[in-house]
Image (spheres, rainbow, N blue to C red):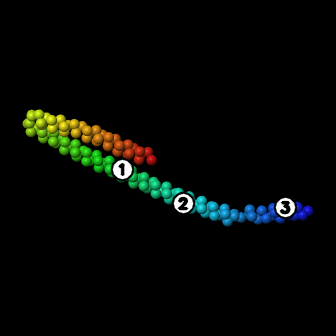
Amino acid sequence: MEERDRLIRQLKSENQQNTGPSPELEKLRAEHAQCTQQIQQKQQQLETLMKQLEDQAEEILSTKIEALTAALAEKNANIALIETSGSTNASAQQAVSQLQTERDQMQKQLRQLSFARDALTEQRKMR
């Protein structure tokens, strides 16, 4: 009989403890909510920084393309100037040849930069 009464008291005590959320559980829930909010804020910050980085990268590529395009125009103008000056000596031909080589290298760089900018633009569209 005593054993039965003790078990009943124990069950009642356990039942009372289980009727409401424990303070430990509430504390854990609050911590979880706070951590979830912090994670969301960090994700938002990360997304903002990634967008800024992509914008800056695209701006840098565009600036480089503009500068290279201007330099190419200058090379072409110099080539045309030498060719129209009527000089047929070896130094003029060598200068034209060197300018054409530099122009070809710059055109290759321009293609690479344009490809990189297009790839970045395509990547941004996919998000």
Q: Which residue is mark 3?
A: 7
* Left or right: residue 121 compared with residue 94: right
Q: Which residue is mark 1?
A: 57
Q: Earlier in the sequence, mark 1 or mark 3?
A: 3
- For disc 1, the neighbor class at 10 Å (few under 14, some 14 to 19, many from 20) is some
Q: How far apart are the alpha carbons under marks 2 and 3?
A: 44 Å
Q: Are marks 2 and 1 in contact (CB under 8 Å)?
A: no
Q: How far apart are the alpha carbons under marks 2 and 1?
A: 30 Å
- Residue flagged by tag 3: what amino acid is it? Leu
Total number of numbered discs in the rendering? 3
The residue lying at 15 percent from left, 42 percent from top is 78
Q: Position of residue 4 (x, y in %)?
A: 88, 61
Q: Position of residue 81 (x, y in %)?
A: 12, 41
- Residue flagged by tag 2: what amino acid is it? Gln
Q: Which residue is mark 2?
A: 37
Q: Quadrant of the N terminus?
A: bottom right
| SS under mark 3 | helix
* Residue 29 quadrant: bottom right
Q: Position of residue 25 (x, y in %)?
A: 66, 62
Q: Position of residue 125 (x, y in %)?
A: 41, 46
* Left or right: residue 62 compared with residue 93: right
Disc nearest the viewer among 2 and 3: 3
Marker disc for residue 20: none
The residue lying at 71 percent from left, 64 percent from top is 20
- Residue flagged by tag 1: what amino acid is it? Ala
Q: Earlier in the sequence, mark 2 or mark 3?
A: 3
The residue lying at 53 percent from left, 60 percent from top is 38
